[in-house]
Amino acid sequence: GLTIEGKEYASRLRDFVERTRYISPETEEDIVHDPEHRDTCKKRPLVIFSSGLKRSFETLRPLQRLQASSNEDRSLLHSDNASEGEIESVETDVFNTTALNEISAGVFDGMTYDEIKQLHPKQFAARLKNKVSYRYPGGESYRDVIQRLQPIVHELERQKSDVLVVSHTAPIRLLLAYFLGKPVEKMALEDIPMHCVFEIRPKAYGCDLIKHRIMKENEFHRT
């Protein structure tokens, strides 16, 4: 399950999502810093795409007032490790899909990079040499993840409403590379901080990226 920090982030993510969905019924402009007048405003529709891993589903738990959509008519999107029907019905579609799962480390799953470096130095060196093409023994490469993300990219591009994607480091890097038009080789090395929301805003040519730090690093200190 989620750590204490993960649960706090999930709660703050809910607040962030709720705070940024209000728009003026007259101007259709965002209303973020005027909570007193939200009763007269409306919310933009929201579609959530989540990985099939349990920790992603738990991240969405504070958003339980949102609606879980039935996936019966979408062969592309299906739940895996997350239970269906646990999110109470209101107004938002939620889709769980294994296409957004973290890159599979195969036989190295559960090991740290230091452990891999110490126990499997040749594999560690091969990954450093070509991170995008390197495939974990019994697992995936970044190119494999690109292939399984393609249907998700098509789904994201066809959405008319706001979209929230709850995923993991490798898929996030690749989605950012695609929508920002950056080389995969460069984005594969990009730091993806925890407890952060990457907001992509389409514009006439390309997209703008806004980083929202929901929690500061080391905000929680264990004794």
Image (cartoon, rainbow, N blue to C red):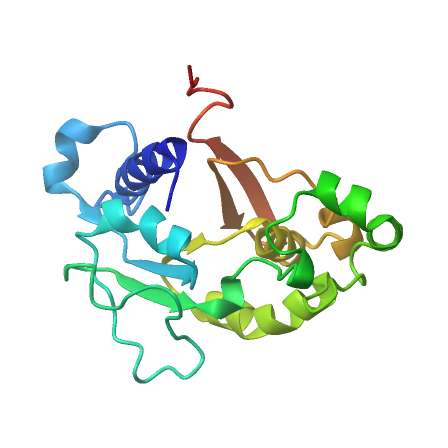
Residue 139, relative to residue 177: is it above or below? below
Q: On the image, which quarter does residue 45 sit in?
A: bottom left
Number of marks in the image? Answer: 0
Query: Which residue does the image show at 83% across and 55% down from the upper left?
Result: 123
**Residue 147: image location, x then y, percent:** 65, 73
The residue nearer to you, when weighing 218 against 12, is 218
**How far from the left and from the top, in percent, is residue 191?**
66, 38
The quadrant in which residue 83 appears is bottom left
Which residue sits at x=43%, y=59%? 53
The outermost residue toward the left is 39
Position of residue 138 measured from the top left corner of the image (x, y, whole percent): 70, 69
Q: Residue shown at 44%/55% (left/top)?
A: 165
Residue furthest to the front in view is 119
Left or right, 204 with respect to 31, comes to right
Above or below 36: residue 45: below
* Residue at image coords 73%, 62%: 136
For the C terminus, the image quarter is top left
Is residue 8 something one can see in this rendering?
yes
Q: Answer whether residue 30 is visible to the viewer in this image.
A: no
Residue 146 lies, in percent from the top left, at 66, 67
